[in-house]
Amino acid sequence: MRARRSAGQRRITIEDKVAFLASLHAYPDAGKAVDVKETHMSWVFLTDRHAYKLKKPVRYGPLDYGSVAARRRNCAREVRLNRRLAPDVYLGKVALTLDDAGDLHIGGPGRTVDWLVKMRRLAASRTLEHAIDRHRLRPEDIDAVAGRLGAFYREARRISVSPEGYCRALEAHVVASHQQLSRPFFALDRDAIDELAAAQMTFMERRRELFAERARSGRIVEGHGDLRPEHIYLYETPIIVDCLEFDRRLRAIDPASELAFLAMECDRLGAEFVEDRLFNAYRRETQDAPSRQLISAYKLFHAYLRAKIAISHLDDVQIRQPLKWKRRTRQYLDLAGQYADALHLRRKSEAVPRRR
């Protein structure tokens, strides 16, 4: 005869966890409401003072949140890595527990059924994205961000990679993005997709030494990996959150590439002036002077990659706002076209890249 389970041994579903964390009684400091934000990989529950992140039990390539143990490891890694640029924001990982009566608690008694990242809540009105959107971004704000990042990159862990290995990794991203964007399911303009991929490979062939020299001179560091305007908070000392914790390879980056990504995202938001101010301040802070051509090429690569990431949301069976992601994909492809044209790269006669 099978033993009867106690209430504390019952199976807890992800829906149970989300419902509990969305409720006021889960938190002593919730205030009047709990604001819930859902992303592709997690839920974030916002109280008056704090934010709690619950990772979805998913696996996407190198991202593995499939088990409680894996989510515990990734929560710990997220806290450790993000404290580099937001030391007072990431308060730690906390257990989600189930007691003998079958009740869930944050950090309470009972067995651990999941893990959360606990953060200090920051004001959305202080993000770089919000400042751009409201036309309130000041030149000195960009100087402060560049100074913060310049100091970060000076102290960041150097990653050893051969010049040829670095170039091949960039090419592999182009090939993978081209393959995804070319899928008939997405119904994108195949000619444009092919042209942009060929433009990037053409630049790699013509100016390979630009990228090789970055690796040769030890510029590749363990950076942030997702330096978007929504992740930058314009306090007196800028705070930068939400680095990519799940794959070290995505954090292995040339600071010029990471800053070019940020400049590209600012271009998309209509703040094209950010690039010059950002890189001028970065050069003063670090004495690193990447060429304008290298910066433009990095912007092209990032725009194409972000187009791939945006359209990939349509693969999610529970996709919300599909029109948003189609529109975002077109924005990135349009930007990529502008960068390719500025570099005089788009020619239909160029060959489409193949996997090596």
Image (spheres, helix red, strand yellow):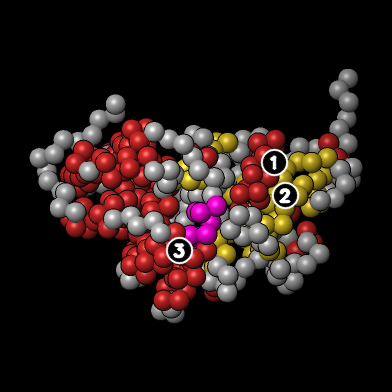
Three-letter amino acid code at disc 1? Arg
Magenta-span inclusion, residue 137:
no
Name the one closer to the observer, 122 or 162.
Answer: 162
Find the distance from the CA under tag 3 to the CA under tag 1. 37 Å
Q: Which residues are magenta?
A: 149-155
Pointer 3: what residue?
285
Find the distance from the CA under tag 3 to the CA under tag 2. 34 Å
Identity of the residue furthest to the left in this view: 349
Give the answer, above or below, for where 15 lies relative to 168: below
Residue under the image location 52 percent in, 59 percent down: 151
- Which labelled disc corresponds to residue 93? 2
Name the one closer to the observer, 29 or 123.
Answer: 123
**Label 3 vs 2, first from the N-terminus:** 2
Main SS of the magenta segment?
A: helix
Three-letter amino acid code at disc 2? Lys
What is the x, y in percent for residue 212?
Answer: 32, 40
Name the one closer to the observer, 169 or 267.
Answer: 169
